[in-house]
Image (tube, grey):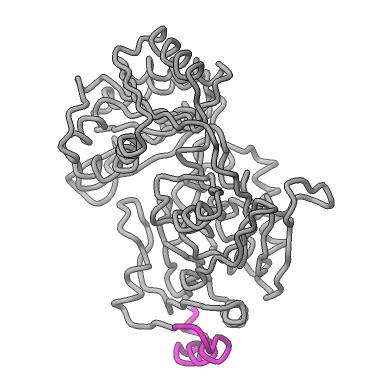
C-alpha cells in the first residue's frame, strides 16, 4: 500500500523541507526520473520517487532520516550513482538521499599517511590531491574518474590495483556513520592497527547503505614508490592460457601491481572502438600488467614466466605516456563492449587464482552452448572476472541470458568463489544470499540489519533482500 493513502504528499514534503532546510529538494519528474533507474537493462524499478534530496551537511541528513522514520519512507543513499547491481536506484514512493554535494577533502596528512574525506569525493580527485603531497590513494576501480569514495566504501569496490593493494576495505581506517535514528557514530580511527571492540568499521564497508549513511571516511595513503614503473602487455592463445600465466606470476614473489585480462572478443571491440590493431583472433587474449617499483630482475623474470606459459608476444615500456595508454585500454573496455549490443548484463564473480583458467573455459562453453554473446575481461590477478552478456531484441534479459548467468553463478560457487567480487549485491543478486552464504549466515545478516535499522528504511530490498 502506498504511503500516500495514509499521508498527503504535500504534508510529507512540508515536513521534509522543515527538517532539512539547507538541502536541495527536487520534486519535478525531469530530475527525479534520472535517478529512479540509471538505464540498466536488468533494472526492475518502476514508478516514481517522492523526492530527490541533495544534502550539503549532516544536519540535513539527520532531517531526512527523521522525516523518513515518521512516514515510514525508504531512503536510498546515492553519490555518483554508478552502481551496476540496482544498488542505488530510487524506489517508488521513497527519498533519494544524494550526498554528492558533500565532496570536500578535509585533510591530507603526510606524517600519518592518511586522508579524511566526505563521501561525495571522486576517487580520482582524492588520488590527484594525495599525489601533490608525494602520496597516492591505492584503490583503483575502472570507474575511478567518475565513482565516489562513499560509493566505493558502500560496495567495497576493488579495481585494477587490487592484486597488490587490496580492495577499498584495505584502505579504510575509520568512518563516521549516521544511523537510521539520526545518531552519528565514529568507528575505527587514524591508526593502521586497532583491536579494541568489534570491528564495526569493516561491517559498514560493503554494507551498501543498508546499515547507516557514511558521512566521513578516513583512508590510508601510500608514498609514491621510488622505483621505475614498468608497463607491459602480453598476448595468449585464449583466456585459459592467460589465466595460467597470471597464476604463475601471482605465486612468483614478483608482486605486480596490476594484472588485467581481456578476452579476444573484448580486444576486437577495443580495436574497433579505439582504432587500434591488437587483436589477432576472436580467441586470443590480452594481459595488461604493471610493476610500480620494478627493476631488471622483476622485468626479466616476468617475461620468462609469461613466455613459459605460452605468451607469444610481450611488449614492455617505462614510458609513462605509453603505459597510461595501455591502462586506458582497460578503462575503455566497457564502452567498447557496450557498442556491440543494445542491452547488457555485466557480471562480477571471483574465484581462487588456481581456478581462474577453469572458470574462463567454462564461460566460453556456456556462451557457445546457449548462443549468448559474452565478452570477458577483469582483474585476473585476483581471480575477478566480468563476463558481459549482450543482446539486442528486447529490454528484458531473454531466457538464454538468464540461464547463462545462472550457470556462471553456480560454477563460480562450485569453484570456491563468489558471485560478487566487487560490484556489490544490490537487487540483482540478493536472492542468491542463501546459496552463497548458507542459511545460518543469511539469518544472521537479517538480524544485524534489524539491529541497525529496525524500521527498514535504509536502502530496503538491497544487499540481503
Residue 170 at x, y percent in the picture: 63, 43
Residue nearest the viewer, comparing 174 with 241:
174
Q: How many marks?
A: 0
- For the view shown, which residue lies furthest in the right direction? 196
* Residue drawn at (39%, 54%) of the image: 145
Residue nearest the viewer, comparing 456 with 322:
322
**In the visual, does 420 lie left or right of 390?**
right
* Residue drawn at (56%, 42%) of the image: 167
Residue 406 at x, y percent in the picture: 41, 34
* Residue drawn at (41%, 74%) of the image: 49
Residue nearest the viewer, comparing 318 with 222:
318
Say if residue 403 shows up in the picture: no
- For the view shown, which residue lies furthest in the top direction? 308
Q: Main secondary structure of the magenta part?
A: helix
Which residues make up the magenta segment?
3-24
Residue 232 at x, y percent in the picture: 37, 26
Residue 457 at x, y percent in the picture: 58, 69
Q: Is residue 255 above or below residue 82?
A: above
In what quadrant of the picture does the C terminus appear?
bottom right
Residue 20 colored in magenta in the image: yes
Q: Is residue 366 above or below residue 443?
A: above
Residue 13 colored in magenta in the image: yes
**In the visual, does 116 lie left or right of 132?**
right
Amino acid at each position: 500500500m502506498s504511503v500516500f493513502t495514509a499521508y498527503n504528499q504535500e504534508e510529507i514534503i512540508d515536513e521534509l523541507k522543515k527538517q532539512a532546510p539547507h538541502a536541495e529538494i527536487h520534486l519535478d519528474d525531469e530530475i527525479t526520473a534520472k535517478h529512479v533507474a540509471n538505464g540498466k537493462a536488468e533494472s526492475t524499478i518502476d514508478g516514481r520517487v517522492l523526492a530527490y534530496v541533495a544534502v550539503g551537511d549532516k544536519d540535513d541528513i539527520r532531517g531526512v532520516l527523521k522525516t523518513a522514520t515518521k512516514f515510514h519512507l525508504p531512503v536510498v543513499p546515492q553519490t555518483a550513482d554508478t552502481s551496476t547491481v540496482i544498488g542505488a536506484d530510487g524506489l517508488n514512493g521513497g527519498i533519494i538521499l544524494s550526498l554528492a554535494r558533500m565532496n570536500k577533502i578535509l585533510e591530507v596528512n603526510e606524517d600519518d599517511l592518511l586522508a579524511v574525506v566526505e563521501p561525495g569525493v571522486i576517487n580520482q580527485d582524492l588520488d590527484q590531491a594525495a599525489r601533490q603531497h608525494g602520496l597516492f590513494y591505492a584503490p583503483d576501480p575502472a570507474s575511478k574518474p567518475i565513482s565516489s569514495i562513499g560509493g566505493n566504501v558502500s560496495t567495497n569496490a576493488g579495481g585494477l590495483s587490487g592484486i597488490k593493494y587490496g580492495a577499498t576495505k584495505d584502505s579504510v581506517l575509520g568512518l563516521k556513520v549516521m544511523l537510521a535514528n539520526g545518531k552519528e557514530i565514529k568507528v575505527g580511527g587514524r591508526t593502521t592497527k586497532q583491536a579494541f571492540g568489534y570491528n564495526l568499521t569493516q561491517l559498514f564497508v560493503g554494507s551498501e547503505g543498508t546499515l547507516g549513511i557514511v558521512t566521513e571516511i578516513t583512508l590510508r595513503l601510500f608514498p609514491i614508490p621510488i622505483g621505475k614503473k614498468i608497463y607491459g602487455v602480453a598476448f595468449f592463445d585464449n583466456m585459459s592460457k592467460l589465466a595460467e600465466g597470471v597464476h604463475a606470476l601471482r605465486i612468483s614473489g614478483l608482486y605486480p601491481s596490476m594484472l588485467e585480462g581481456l578476452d579476444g572478443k573484448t580486444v576486437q571491440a577495443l580495436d574497433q572502438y579505439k582504432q587500434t590493431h591488437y587483436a589477432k583472433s576472436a580467441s586470443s587474449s590480452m594481459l595488461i600488467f604493471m610493476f610500480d617499483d620494478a627493476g631488471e630482475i622483476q622485468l626479466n623474470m616476468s617475461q620468462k614466466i609469461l613466455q613459459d606459459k605460452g605468451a607469444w608476444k610481450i611488449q614492455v615500456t617505462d614510458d609513462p605516456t605509453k603505459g597510461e595508454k595501455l591502462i586506458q585500454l582497460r578503462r575503455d573496455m566497457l564502452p567498447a563492449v557496450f557498442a556491440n549490443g543494445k542491452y547488457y548484463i555485466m557480471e562480477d564473480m571471483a574465484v581462487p587464482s588456481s581456478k581462474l583458467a577453469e572458470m574462463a573455459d567454462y564461460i566460453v562453453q556456456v556462451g557457445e552452448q546457449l548462443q549468448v554473446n559474452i565478452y570477458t575481461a577483469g582483474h585476473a590477478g585476483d581471480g575477478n572476472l566480468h563476463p558481459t552478456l549482450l543482446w539486442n531484441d528486447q529490454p528484458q534479459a531473454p531466457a538464454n541470458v538468464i540461464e547463462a548467468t545462472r550457470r556462471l553463478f553456480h560454477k563460480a560457487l562450485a569453484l570456491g568463489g563468489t558471485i560478487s567480487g566487487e560490484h556489490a549485491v544490490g537487487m540483482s543478486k540478493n536472492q542468491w544470499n542463501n546459496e552463497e552464504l548458507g542459511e545460518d549466515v543469511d539469518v544472521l545478516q537479517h538480524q544485524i540489519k534489524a539491529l541497525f535499522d529496525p524500521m527498514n528504511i535504509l536502502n530496503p530490498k538491497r544487499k540481503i533482500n
